[in-house]
Amino acid sequence: MNTTVIILSFGKTFKIFIVILIFVGSSLLSIPRPQLALSSPSQTGLPTDWPSVFFFDGTHGSYNETFTGEVGDIITIALVVFNLTNTIIPDPQEGTVPLGNLDGFDVQISWNPTVLKYINHTLTVPVEDYPNPIPPSPYAGVLHEEAFQIMNVTDENAAIPNSEPGTMAWFAYTVMPGASVFNGDGTFFTMTFNVITRGSSPLKLTNLRLSGEGGFSPHVKCHQFDGLFHTADAPEADFTFWPDIGVVDKPVIFNASASCSPVNLSISKYIWDFGDETNATLGDPVASHSYVALQDYVVSLVVEDSNGTRSNLKTEQVSIVEKRNVKVVDVSLTPADLVLANRTVDIEVWLENDGRADENCTMKVYYNATAVNWTDISATNWKKIGETNVSIPKGKPSIEQLTWNTTGVPQVDTYYYVLANTTLVPYENDKDNNKTSRDPIFISSTALRDVAITKLEFGWRRAEGEAFKSPVLDGERTTFQITVLNAGTENETAVNVRLYCNNSMLRSWNQSIPYGNTIKLTSNELFDPGFYNLTALATTEIDVHPDNDRRQGTLHVIETPKLNFTFDPKTPYANQTVSFDASPSFHGESGASLTEYKWSIYNPRGTLVKTRSGSDLVNITYEFAHLEVWRVVLSVKDNYGIEYSIHRTATAAYQIGANIQVQPSAGFPIEYIIIIIIVAVAVVAALAIIYRRRRSKT
């Protein structure tokens, strides 16, 4: 064990100051560690969005390359920081965080002492003492005068008190108040090792904290990169896994066949840590493991060659979710019913990812070249129309569109279905991956002309797209909406649409409608109360199906309720029982009735203090506890289900209110009695005091 401890011998006051700063420095340990930024073998440049902390040995131009050496070599590595800047950025947890203005650091590291034997180290602080690049680093030191040391300990037994697990070296520095902050690039320390055996050693940052100016501000946000050393003849661990995102209680297959020895030795052991406290040492490169909890796991692998030399530690993150599933929800066609041979059909497929992972799959669409076998749909001869690759976020739908050119179908004047299929994602329910169009489409050899009214909708509607409400109330405008479909094979340029009311034409339109398309026509009219017979009719030249050109319905416009209620007494006293009677209220529409009464009582401040409702609450009683003006509101619902709504103006007739002036109580007010008693007691007390004083004088 190598241990270096710096003991400071200053005066008592200064020592207290040092202890306080050490306490502040130790508080860094309570800050959550930033997520480790993972390096990639193909990445050669450092990130530029935040500062980066990484190991450097002077032999590579990239921060993410493996350090190599031979047994017996003496190697030196440096821990450096790159790109500290006087910048503050937003942060969702801290509010804002600095990207520089360094005034302290707290670093803990570990290595494999069976491969790398520690010799010594140099803390390159402050920069005034190390103004030039410190080999093997390309950068000078860090921090400015006056800087002082908080922690400087090494222990290859990883037994440093209060350190993170596995820590073999702990270094911490901070600056005195008033010292300049540090920005730019710098070196924290250099460390020298002896390579004592073949194999691999991680250079791991077990803890890293960079303090922004003042120490109490959010800590410097940075990328941090672990390093890796191995001898040139050490094996290399590598593995893949399937599926890319696992499913709980389903096996994840790990394949380490890519692991190899650079000196062509065989791999004899595959040592797995599956991240859930399960370990396995196998002689085969393929392993299977199932997870029982929904979370992310860090899986690691070390391989050993036939000479007993172990590799680097290879890690991958494996996510486990509850389920994965992509399903086909619906298939629709435009035109929906009929198309002329050799023309195109637009296919719209609604997909849904109801699993817990983002998914990529392939969607394919087909038409049936033979009669559909509904018992076993796979027995049908389906001919592919096209396919597309789809990416669907978890829990989201996706609408995909393709075009079908009907040229070359086996037969014309025949009905065809369209089938949509998605490729399976791992461990999904394969029963919902296929869906056919709701109805078949007829491919005709000859041109056909047909327009149809598919809907006649009417009633009161607040805004376009909302549901129609019926009956309509007296004073409201009725909205009509007619949906017209060109169900033929030809574009129609002169479709005549008429709306009749009690056999009199109310409105007409002349429209052009491309084949397969739908239009919606609207009109707003005002009607008196009563019943109205409505007919919508669409005509065009040579319509082959005149039976679908018409839709009918009945509009009902009703009178509104006539509300009234009485109360007795008219000017109640405080705490006096008041009776309310809504029996004078009635529905203005013949045959209609009021089915519910709701009473709401508001105090003089306008706060609702009492609500009572029911089908038989025509009468209620209430005692008003305070003086001033109260408000009583009666709301009703009728047998059509209509009641007052602030969004429907005409329903104002379904509510009525009255102000209740509450008077002082009758008779001699109790407040006066209380005042008289208090005055009398005071007078008696005063007389008693006067009497005692006179007695004392005598």
Image (cartoon, rainbow, N blue to C red):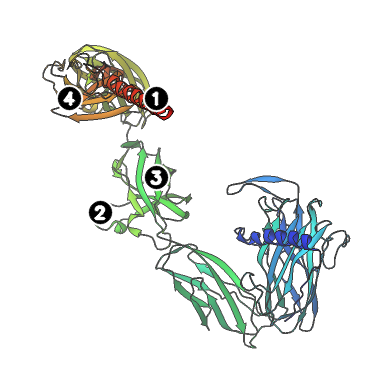
- Disc with the residue nearer the chain's start (1 vs 4): 4
Front position in the image: 317 or 235? 317
Q: Are marks 1 and 4 in contact (CB under 8 Å)?
A: no
**Residue picked out by circle 4:** 621
Q: Tell me the element at label 2.
A: loop
Quadrant for the N terminus in the image? bottom right
**Crowdedness of circle 2 by 10 Å Cα count: few (<14), some, many (20+)?**
few
Residue type for callout 1 = Ile
* Image x and y of residue 287, in percent: 49, 76
Residue assigned mark 1: 690
Direction front: furthest residue: 698
Pointer 3 residue? 349
Residue 293: which quarter of the image? Answer: bottom left
The quadrant of the picture occupied by the C terminus is top left
Q: Which of marks 1 and 4 is in front?
A: 1
Question: Going 80% across and 57% down the picture, which residue do you hit?
Answer: 143
For marks 3 and 4, give the CA distance: 61 Å
Residue 172 image position (x, y, % from top left): 73, 64
Contact flag, marks 3 and 4 (Cβ < 8 Å): no
Which of these two is toward me, 411 or 321?
321
Amino acid on which disc 4 is placed: Thr
- Sequence-wise first label, 1 or 2: 2
Give the residue furthest to the left: 591
Check if mark 1's residue and mark 3's residue have beta carbons within 8 Å: no
